[in-house]
Amino acid sequence: PYSKTGYGVNKAGKVTFQIPFEQQYKADGIDFTTTPMMAVAELDATELEFKHLCGYLEIPIYAITANEAQAFVVKSIKLSTNDNVAISGGVSFQTEGVSDSDYKFDFGSSSSSYILMNCGEGVALGSAVESATSFQFTIPAATYAEGFLLEITNDKGRVIRKVIRGEA
């Protein structure tokens, strides 16, 4: 897998990488430093076809009124699985003898059931569905039947909690 640090493949075909516990907010997109990709090719190949190893969860958030949108500046969002399934930390999987659609992630002892999105100086919210602010997390591609808990913290320390149920 491609990354600046922390990724590798050993001779037995075991891939290791990190899904960061802390991810940075990026306006209108994903923080590409958190998005591991991999390409597998024959030794004499002249082109590589890269594939994403993770999925992406997009959560649009907006305020009910324009006044609320101005008053609520998001500093961070903590995304947790409701059933303590690991979504961040050290990951490995075996590639030998396995098709790329059947990779099974093994999380190490440093794994966690949450990701904290850091919004830097703060992110303003839109004030309608059409102008919702999009927050995108890199997470393992899976069905999360128990859903998630969002804990949204603003610049004044106020925390809003929202449970998202069902498949996400």
Image: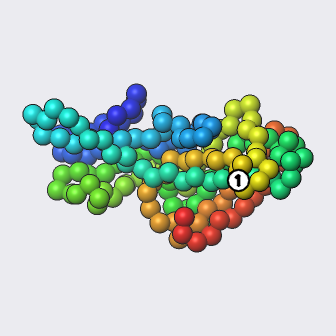
Residue 26's place in the image compared with 64, above or below, is: above
Q: Residue at x 31, y 51 (%)?
A: 93
Q: Amino acid at mark 1?
A: Glu
x then y, percent, for residue 164 = 65, 65
Q: Is residue 69 left or right of residue 6?
A: right
- State the quadrant of the N terminus: top left
Q: Which residue is mark 1?
A: 130
* Residue 59 sits above or below residue 16 on the image: below
Residue visible at 22% across and 57% down? 99
Residue positioned 66% across, 60% down in the render: 149
* Residue 47 image offset from top left, x and y in percent: 20, 35
Asked whether 90 or 31 is in front, the reply is: 31
Query: On the picture, is 104 further left or further right than 76?
Result: left
Q: Which quarter of the image is occupied by the C terminus?
A: bottom right
Residue 120 % position (x, y): 69, 32
For this view, does 140 lie left or right of residue 146? Answer: left
Hey, which residue is sitting farthest left in the picture?
Answer: 44
Residue 110: x percent and y percent? Answer: 48, 46
Q: Secondary structure at mark 1?
A: helix
In the image, residue 146 sits, relative to residue 161, either above or below, namely below
Foreground residue among 168 and 114: 168
- Give left or right: position of 161 versus 24: right
- Farthest residue, direction top: 4
